Every structure is written in C-alpha cells, then in structure tokens.
Amino acid sequence: MITTVEKVLFLKSVDLFSQIPGEDLAQIALITSEEGREAGEDVVVEGEVGDALYVVLDGRVRVRTKDREVAQLGARECFGEMALLDASPRSATVTAITDVALLKISREDFQEIMADKHAISLGVIKVLTRRLREANLR
C-alpha cells in the first residue's frame, strides 16, 4: 500500500495528470484505491458499464476490442478515461498480462472534483482527443 504523498508523486508522472497542480493531485490521490489482478485476469470487460479509470502502478495489461489487440500498457499508463465522463458500455476488454497493481478512480468521486477543478477536466479531454487522433491514423 502506498501513501498519499507517493500517490501524488506517481500521479504527477502520469500523462493524464502531469499538468495538474500538486494540491489538486492530492485531492485525486485521496479518492484512489489500490487493486491488483493476476496474470490472465480481466480488469474490465467490453460491453460492461464503465464506472472507473485505472492507472497501472506496476505490471502490464493488454487492451483488446472485438478480439483484436489494440494496445499494451504498462506503469504510468491509464485506461477507462471515457468511463469518467459517462456510463456507456466499455469499448474494450483489458486483461492483465502479468500480475498487475492498479490505482482505481471512480467516476462518481472524480466528477465531484472535476466540477470544481477545470484543469483536471482539460487533462482528461486532452488525453481522449490524442487517443482519438491516434485511432484515426490506424
């Protein structure tokens, strides 16, 4: 289990949160929970209602949609950003390749913070926009 200070420092190194001031990251760190998955275990499943964002603390995960691998993610990378914005079904299945440690941020808690902190909202929008652009180039 990592401390709140360690979570803040870790989140600062994640692209999605890198431009957010430390005091705002402290608020986000307080709403995170740590989770683990064993190799081969699904973290989220395509089609299920999304309710959280995940950040990989340690290990690797595979992202696939319709049985096609679209990415592999490791430490300091995140998935589930769209679930922070709405409760639509997950667009992909994410499975642990190795044993993986994750930070989970629920939509309900995150939306309360986003309502007051516009920099956080912009961070999410920037990552989603970049990912859409990358998807269009494939």
Image: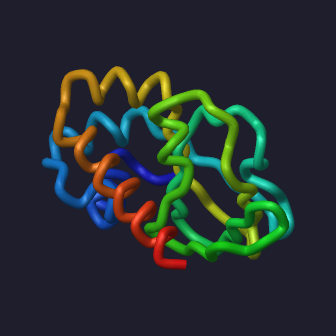
Residue at (50% x, 56% y) in the render: 55
The foreground one among 93 and 132 is 132
Q: How many marks?
A: 0
Residue at (29% x, 29% y) in the render: 114
Question: For this view, does 97 lie left or right of residue 51?
Answer: right
Locate residue 104: give its quadrant: top right
- Residue 88: x and y in percent read 63, 32
Vertical placement of 26 versus 93: above or below?
above
Question: For this view, does 41 lie left or right of residue 2?
Answer: right
Vertical placement of 48 versus 116: above or below?
below
Locate residue 41: give its quadrant: bottom right
Vertical placement of 104 versus 18: above or below?
above
- Residue 120: x and y in percent read 25, 41
Which colour assignment does the render follow?
rainbow
Locate residue 100: give its quadrant: bottom right
Residue at (23% x, 44% y) in the render: 122
Query: Quadrant of the image for the C terminus?
Result: bottom right
- Residue 43: x and y in percent read 73, 52
- Residue 118: x and y in percent read 18, 34
The foreground one among 89 and 109 is 89
Question: For this view, does 136 lie left or right of residue 115?
Answer: right
Residue at (32% x, 47% y) in the render: 125
